[in-house]
Amino acid sequence: MPKIVDHEKQKQLLAEATWRIIRRHGMEQASVRHIAEEAGISVGSLRHYFATQSELFAYSMQLVSERVDARISSLPFSGPPLEDMKKVLCQLLPMDEESRSEMEVWIAFMTKALADPSLKALGDQVFEKMRLGIHSIIESLVQLELAAVDLNVDLETARLHSLIDGLAMHAVIRPDSLSPERLEELVTLHLKSLCKL
Amino acid sequence: MPKIVDHEKQKQLLAEATWRIIRRHGMEQASVRHIAEEAGISVGSLRHYFATQSELFAYSMQLVSERVDARISSLPFSGPPLEDMKKVLCQLLPMDEESRSEMEVWIAFMTKALADPSLKALGDQVFEKMRLGIHSIIESLVQLELAAVDLNVDLETARLHSLIDGLAMHAVIRPDSLSPERLEELVTLHLKSLCKL
């Protein structure tokens, strides 16, 4: 089915062109015309894949989330539990140029979603998926009897979730202040602080 | 000097009109024309106060930061140290409609700053001021001998700073999940986790 593959591939190329425009010029410049130009196709051809700018944005936003999922699914889990948990959490942070680009675009979409209901539902869905993933990490700490005895699973889920998104945001807006090594160190510190002494 | 006062007052009204447009319609719609319309003045009159959109945005962004500073300066510090620290940190979170509105706008400006050098310098300046404020809270914990013995001031500054901004962002994008009481509870939990048992 080469045609279907090509269709999906072309949509991804358009999403990536959208990311580049947003990163380089900001959301205000991410018009359908600019994106088509960046992708090297006509506006008419772009409309063949995405009837509206909203559809293109929703797809581009979804693709960020799918890339993160794919990276987490392909992680080799083998080390001690805290090490594996750290690996998962680091996939939610800008650790290299690829993930930095994704997260920069994600923040732009989340900001746009505040005033754009068509993106809000998707944003909420990804937020909830991430919250559940972090919840299961905290629960694992309890089940493996690593957690401090008085650990409150719901509060600690909210704290870790906010910390991860705050670190991602800081690493995007101030890359110099948070290197990948520093991010890893902070995630490790936090996980250890949740554990028994 | 009623004229100077009026001039400053009018600039604040224009900044607040900018905030409303950004909150309601997003940054893409925050054109000088829309903002003038929202403020009920002509584009020509707006240009009398701000020659360019960049100047208006920089002023509007600066005003958010000044409002937060003013609230912190007017706090009554009287309680136990952890209580006073919590009070300061909560001023950096959306605890009511006013601060929610400020932080929603702040996030939009920080996102725009990623692709707009004219706003980036101001964003960096406020980031650094906030980092220093949080650093002095962590140092106070050490000086008051409340901190756990192995506390690393720099790492804990970065962790608390990211946590506060992550909580602010989550409370803005998912207000239902983080009530003011919940935010206070999380800040208290974190401060306590930094202290001796």
Image (tube, coloured by chain):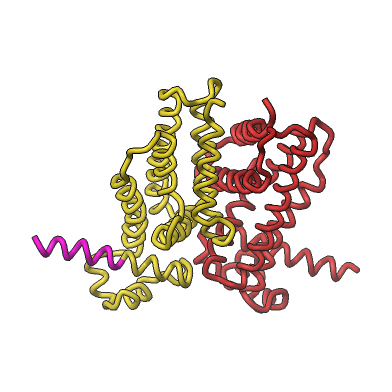
Chain colours: A yellow, B red
Q: Position of residue A58 (x, y in %)?
A: 34, 56
Magenta stretch in the rendered image: A1-14
Q: Position of residue B61 (x, y in %)?
A: 66, 62
Query: In the rendered view, does A189 fall on the left or right side of A38?
Result: right
Most extreme residue toward the left is A1
Residue at 61%, 45% (x, y): give it. B164
Q: Position of residue A153 (x, y in %)?
A: 49, 27
**Predominant secondary structure, magenta span:** helix
Q: Is residue B115 magenta?
A: no
Residue at 22%, 68% (x, y): give it. A48
Q: Position of residue A104 (x, y in %)?
A: 46, 60
In the foreground, A97 or A114 = A97
Q: Quadrant of the N terminus of chain A?
A: bottom left
Query: In the rendered view, does A48 fall on the left or right side of A141?
Result: left
In the foreground, A94 or A5 = A94
Q: Is residue B116 above or below residue B166?
A: below
Residue at 27%, 78% (x, y): give it. A42
Query: In the rendered view, does A34 fall on the left or right side of A172?
Result: left
Q: Quadrant of residue B75?
A: top right
Q: Is residue A13 magenta?
A: yes
Residue at 62%, 63% (x, y): give it. B18
Q: Is residue A68 above or below residue A43?
A: above
In the foreground, B39 or B129 = B129
